[in-house]
Amino acid sequence: MIPDQLSQEERSILLELARQELNRAVLREPRSSTDLSSLPPRLQELGATFVTLTINGELRGCIGALEAYQPLAEDVKEHAMAAALQDYRFPPVKPDELPNINIEISRLTPAKPFDYQTSNDLLKGLRPGVDGVVLRYGGRRATFLPQVWEKIPDPSTFLSHLCQKMGAAPDLWLHKKLDVLIYQVEEFHE
């Protein structure tokens, strides 16, 4: 949970923009332009999001940004399209899948460095279900949203899977001091 939550109306607008962009992208229609001035002011502000697509609770695509670089509404649209077509873990979403896709949006707080000395400090300091985690090491980087704790609740296993996602050995976090950042999200879905 992050401070300064979006209103229900703002959330509904973002979910509708994500759905429209998802449909356009999968149906190979041109990207739509958004009149930002017609949107609530907070949707015009810079924001960082991840858009997650699921079918029957199973991941179908997830792409986002850790740092805000564009208006929140545009960020959601870009990542809805990318989650459908550019997540390397999955083939592009097909038109016949559209009715079964559920959209989840995660609005991120800025990531902050997590200072720790030992791997045990790291385990004790993370807050399962609350903290999103970024690991960085040797030019590589990977993140898990706080929602991933639901599927991987054990901090040791969580960090091992995140090391693997980064392309490193699962036990790297036990032997090397990694750059660790944490963030929280405001999550909402259709």
Image: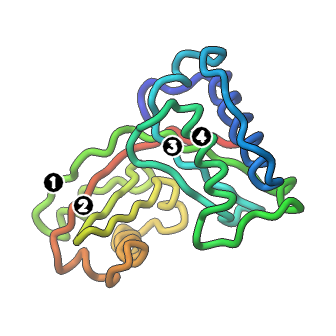
**Crowd band around label 3 with a 10 angstrom C-alpha radius: few (<14), some (14–19), many (20+):** many
Q: Are marks 3 and 4 in contact (CB under 8 Å)?
A: yes
Foreground mark, 1 or 2? Answer: 1
Label 1 to label 2: alpha-carbon separation: 12 Å
Quadrant containing the C terminus is top right
Label 3 to label 4: alpha-carbon separation: 6 Å
Label 1 to label 4: alpha-carbon separation: 30 Å
Disc 2, SS: helix
Foreground mark, 2 or 3? Answer: 3
Foreground mark, 1 or 3? Answer: 3
Decide: is 54 above or below 78: below
Q: Which residue is mark 4?
A: 76
What amino acid is found at the position of numbered circle 1 in the picture?
Asp
- In terms of sequence position, does the residue under pointer 1 or pointer 3 come before the other? 3
Q: Position of residue 181 (x, y in %)?
A: 28, 53
Q: Which residue is mark 3?
A: 49
Label drawn at residue 48: none
Q: Are marks 1 and 4 in contact (CB under 8 Å)?
A: no
Residue at the spot x=15%, y=54% of the render? 115
**Crowd band around label 1 with a 10 angstrom C-alpha radius: few (<14), some (14–19), many (20+):** few
Label drawn at residue 115: 1
Residue at the spot x=50%, y=61% of the render? 148
- In terms of sequence position, does the residue under pointer 1 or pointer 2 come before the other? 1
Disc 4, SS: helix
Q: Position of residue 15 (x, y in %)?
A: 69, 37
What amino acid is found at the position of numbered circle 4 in the picture?
Val
Q: Which residue is mark 2?
A: 124
Disc tally is 4
Disc 3, SS: strand
Return the residue nearer the eye: 163 or 56. Answer: 163
